[in-house]
Image (cartoon, helix red, strand yellow):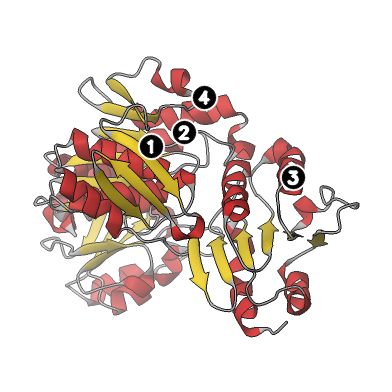
Amino acid sequence: MGLDRLSIRDICSITGARHHGASDQRFSSIVVDSREVTPGALFVALPGERTDGHHFVEQALDSGAAGALVARSARDRYPGPHAVVQMRADKTVLEVAGTLPALQAMAAAYRDLVESVTVVGITGSNGKTTTKELIGAVVQAAHPAFVTRGNLNSDIGLPLSLFCIEPEHRYAVLEMGMNRVGEMQELARMARPDVAVITNIGTAHIGNIGSIEGIAEEKKAITSEFSGSERLLIWEDEPQFKRLARNVRGTVEPYGPRSTSGWERFEDHGVLGSTLYWRGRTITLSLCGAHSVRNALAAIHVGLLFGIGEEAIVSGIESVQPLFGRGQILRGRTTTILDCYNANPESMGEALRLLSSTGTSGRRIAVLGAMKELGELTDGAHRSVVALAMGMPLDRVFLVGKEFEDAAPVDDTRFRYFDGIEELSAALPTEIRGGDTVLIKGSRSLALERIVPQLEAEGE
């Protein structure tokens, strides 16, 4: 991690910190979880909904952290760190007005130190993480590059990702997510992407933003630091394309089948993935669903933009496997499509279409968990998902969560409603048979992956 390029004097200048203890050391890494401390790290004490990082500062220092970034306002409540530096000459405590703004300011300053690295920023209502993985794999097939690990894409995760960029990297592929007004602009101020990709505009987090148009404007803020030479890539059939492209200080390019040089076609094999035909080449895409083909087209576009060879583009795309809970296929007594990392009406529709088109010797069963952060659209969104499912060739549909209660049909015997996962789990032994294909789709807070062991263990 490149934090060692910033001295304590630099950090104090950037953040307005007041330092106590050792002043001549450099930190080897930066962490916000005391359980992840490594020798020489700087521990940033962040306040949270459930706990306050200041409670763990002493533990972090005892575990090998060389220093801690703390809020001045926390000194009276947590005097321990200052006592540590009085006894340990090799430890440093940096006091700032706010630890999160300080972390972000440090990340923005670090971005200046790796200015030669071309940064790709990826956002959108759906498909961010998969698109990031595909673009990252294509770029890494040809050049040294950093790719966001997991989905560290928030106002906390993005700065941690930025510190992982090294001077020897030629590219950095960063996922950038938002769920509130103004957050994307904060992220753009830190990352300053040279190329921005907007996968789509949907209803995810509409309860916080208010409207589709508002979501589009917030996503568009990924370009807020553009100065003229940067590029914005938008899905060619995005309904909000004109709004996203308007007044961007840079080049706007569509991506998609019509916009991709040499694109021929694709064949959808359901849970087996897809075969892509491009420039006379055959690409085996392990990710399932037509939406995954869209994400692969973004990777092809970026690869061509960076002058990456066709063989590297193909090998990069073919190397990507489904991530946990994101269209992951589990094979055993049943075939399970585990897509429970998040859910909104658009991604629900994609998942249901995948299930409906999948060949199976057994039955097609959908387990649909409630969708969160939809605000005033909550009731209508759940009703629309139920209406869509009613018109599909599905054998059983299990609706989980209070948001589905009023939407559950009373005259369609294929549907069953459950208040929560406990009630669903109790019913599964008599509902699931060997050979069934089961879609599990819902918001992260439901943790629907907990039912997977039962799908495998229970008999008919």
Per the image, label 3 sits on a secondary structure element best described as loop
Distance from the alpha carbon under mark 2 to that under mark 1 = 7 Å
**Most extreme residue toward the right, as rendered?**
411
Per the image, label 1 sits on a secondary structure element best described as helix
Q: Name the residue under label 2.
A: 182
Contact, mark 2 vs mark 1 (Cβ under 8 Å): yes
Q: Mark 3 points at which residue?
A: 391
Answer with mark 2 or mark 4, whichever residue precedes in sequence: 2
Per the image, label 4 sits on a secondary structure element best described as loop
Q: In this view, does 342 lie above or below 203?
A: below
**Most extreme residue toward the top, as rendered?**
247
The amino acid sitting under disc 4 is Pro
Q: Between tags 2 and 4, which lies in front?
A: 4
Which residue is found at the position 21% from the left and 76% from the top? Answer: 88
Q: How crowded is mark 1: few (under 14 residues within 10 Å), some or many (20 or more)?
A: some
Q: Can residue 96 be seen in this view?
A: no
Answer with mark 3 or mark 4, whichever residue precedes in sequence: 4
Answer with mark 4 or mark 1, whichever residue precedes in sequence: 1
Answer with mark 3 or mark 2, whichever residue precedes in sequence: 2
Which residue is found at the position 45% from the left and 32% from the top? Answer: 219
User: In screen coordinates, is 325 left or right of 103?
Assistant: right
User: In screen coordinates, is 9 left or right of 361?
Assistant: left
Give the image location of residue 417, x and y in percent.
Answer: 81, 60
Q: Mark 1 points at which residue?
A: 186
Distance from the alpha carbon under mark 3 to that under mark 2 = 39 Å
Give the image quarter of residue 363.
Answer: bottom right
Badge number at residue 113: none
Q: Is residue 348 above or below residue 214?
A: below
In this rendered view, identify the residue nearer to me: 285 or 304: 285
